[in-house]
Amino acid sequence: HPEGGYYKEYYRSELTVINKNGDKRSAATAIHYLLEKGNFSCFHRIQSDEGWHFYRGSEVLVYIINPETGKEEVIHLNKDNPVYVVPATWWFAAECVEAYGHVGCTVAPGFDFNDFEMATYDNLIKEFPKANK
């Protein structure tokens, strides 16, 4: 996957919807996603909500940044906290704590690479200047 890790899309709805930007998208998509220790998902954002579901392995940390406040938070996905939804347009990244983490990601409206933006250091600091301190 461009931001890191391994994925396999297993569902793409045949139903289509118009997203908030006026673009036609599948109603929903779903993937299996595997992260190994030392591998990570770089900060990125998409234009849809993304639900993360913990399946097996070691804990996966999901780092999120609220775009309105700049507040950073770490979500611990594990057997005791197996689900989290990253809101649309929030920057997020993930890493596995130990050997591997197997999670699923469900996106609605469905994922499209046209809605995908990879973060750079410069654009994060521009958007969140206080984070540089």
Image (cartoon, grey):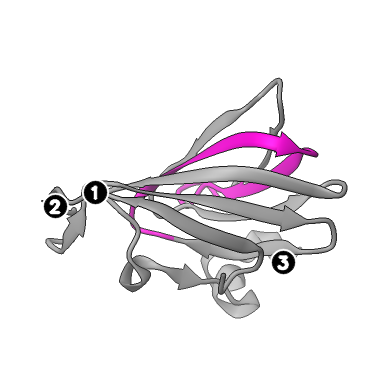
- Mark 3 element type: helix
Which mark sits nearer the N-terminus, 2 or 3? Answer: 2
Query: Which is more foreground, mark 2 or mark 3?
Result: 2
Query: Which is more foreground, mark 1 or mark 2?
Result: 1
Q: Tell me the magenta residue range.
A: 46-70
Q: CA distance from mark 2 to mark 3?
A: 41 Å
Q: Position of residue 48 (x, y in %)?
A: 34, 51
Q: Name the magenta segment's main secondary structure.
A: strand
Task: Identify the residue shown where x is 57% and y is 54%.
Answer: 92
Q: Label 3, on which residue?
A: 132
Q: Considering the image in quadrants, where does the C terminus appear? A: bottom right
Q: Is residue 60 magenta?
A: yes
- Mark 2 element type: strand
Q: CA distance from mark 1 to mark 2?
A: 7 Å
Q: Is residue 58 magenta?
A: yes
Task: Identify the residue shown where x is 84% and y is 46%.
Answer: 97
Q: Label 1, on which residue?
A: 13
**47 relative position to 101: left or right:** left
What residue occupies the far top of the structure in this picture?
80
Q: Amino acid at mark 3?
A: Asn
Vertical position of residue 9 compared to residue 125: above or below: above
Q: Position of residue 80 (x, y in %)?
A: 71, 20
Q: Is residue 72 visible?
A: no
What residue occupies the far front of the structure in this picture?
10
Q: Label 2, on which residue?
A: 16
**46 relative position to 35: left or right:** left
Q: Amino acid at mark 2?
A: Thr
- Mark 1 element type: loop
Task: Identify the residue shown where x is 13% and y is 52%.
Answer: 16
Q: Check if mark 1's residue and mark 2's residue have beta carbons within 8 Å.
A: yes
Q: Amino acid at mark 1?
A: Ser
